Image: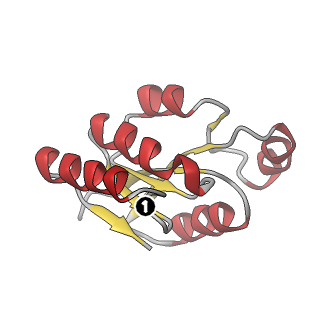
Amino acid sequence: MMKKIRILVVGLGTMGISHARAYQAIEGFDLVGLCTNRPETRHDLQTEFKSIPLFADYEEALEKLKPDAVSICTYTETHADYCLKALNAGAHVFCEKPLAHRIEDAETVVELATKVKKALIIG
């Protein structure tokens, strides 16, 4: 049996919740954590995702969970920074588009993904 990919979903608006539900339904994934900085969202999610750890701090989630992959569904201005943090933590990355607001930031993310040999998928 293939090892499940341990994934953290960051950003829990409509897209992030959709990702979290999908990862729960896909056999090859293990949804190990959720992260949002919106308290009202965290409260609502505790009902649907009772057994999944919920974090307000992204760096804390990366450190404690050590996920294999991170699904970044946050506001676009955070994408590049969150991708860099995930890659530096040793995780593969799926990031909602756009990857970055500036081409230089996107290039930095791609260069790091190449250097650390991690998948970087933009969707």
The colour scheme is secondary structure
Q: Residues within 10 Å of mark 1 (few under 14, many from 20)?
A: many
Q: Is residue 65 left or right of residue 18?
A: left
Q: Residue at x 30, y 50 (%)?
A: 109
- The kind of residue on which mark 1 rests is Leu
Q: Residue at x 60, y 61 (%)?
A: 20
Q: Is residue 104 left or right of residue 116?
A: right
Q: Residue at x 78, y 50 (%)?
A: 45
Image coordinates for residue 40, horizontal then vertical, percent: 87, 43
Query: Which residue is the site of mark 1?
Result: 99
- Return the residue nearer the eye: 101 or 82: 101
Image coordinates for residue 119, horizontal then vertical, percent: 24, 60
Q: Quadrant of the C terminus?
A: bottom left
- Return the residue nearer the eye: 103 or 57: 103
Please tell me how many numbered marks the rendered image carries: 1
Q: Quadrant of residue 121?
A: bottom left
Q: Secondary structure at mark 1?
A: loop
Q: Quadrant of residue 46?
A: top right
Q: Is residue 115 left or right of residue 88?
A: left
Image coordinates for residue 12, horizontal then vertical, percent: 69, 54
- Residue 103, compared with residue 27, is above or below; it is above
Q: Quadrant of residue 33?
A: top right
Q: Quadrant of the N terminus?
A: bottom left
Image coordinates for residue 19, horizontal then vertical, percent: 58, 66
Q: Residue at x 57, y 50 (%)?
A: 77
